[in-house]
Image (cartoon, grey):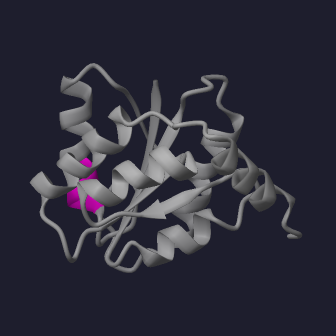
Amino acid sequence: MQLFLGADHNGFAMKAFLAEALRQDDQQVVDTGDEQLRPDDDFPQFAQSAVQALLAATDPDAKVILICGSGQGMCMAANRFKGIRASLCWDADEARAARNDDDSNVLCLPARFIDNQTALSIVETWLATPFAGAARFKRRIHQLDELPE
């Protein structure tokens, strides 16, 4: 599975930690930026790069992990793209629900409010949880995709 990771300066260190942990777990990690710590960078460009990579990916199971200070900005930016279901998760229970119920394909993490080990637990849960595929969940996702831009 391809995993596209993006982060601004607030999430830069957490992104590096997660990328290393995921690579050790034999995941195919693609770092979409930033490549170096830049304290004055802005999150929208990294959300856009990662989401566009996901939308262009040939791997049907590909996913994105985005990290900024609160996670909110990345989530807002990612959800502007049709077909993206970005979820902000603070714990494993939210990650499980985001995948099970909503087929989340983008995970957003709040680097200022969780530590690296918590982030890794959230990521592992999110990746391990399949979409339940219940009719009501599929119907709601379809409704999301039909919302006007």
Left or right: 73 in relation to 92: right
- Looking at the image, is 62 positioned above or below residue 87? above
Q: Residue at x 49, y 77 (%)?
A: 73
Quarter containing the C terminus: bottom right
**Which span of residues is magenta-colored?**
12-16
Q: Position of residue 66 (x, y in %)?
A: 42, 57
From the viewer's perspective, tell me whether residue 81 is left or right of residue 8. right
User: What's the magenta bit mostly, secondary-structure-wise?
Assistant: helix
Question: Residue 13 at what x, y percent from top left?
Answer: 20, 59
Task: Locate residue 100 relative to residue 23 in the image: left or right.
Answer: right
Residue shown at the point (47%, 44%) measured from the top left: 100
Residue 86 drawn above or below residue 138: below
Quarter-of-image position of residue 128: top left
Residue 9 belongs to the span the image colors magenta:
no
Would residue 131 be visible to someone looking at this image?
yes
Q: Is residue 138 above or below residue 24?
A: below
Q: Where is residue 4 in the image (x, y as percent from the top left)?
A: 47, 41
**From this viewpoint, is residue 32 visible?**
no
Q: How many labels does the image show?
A: 0
Q: In which quarter of the image is residue 14?
A: bottom left
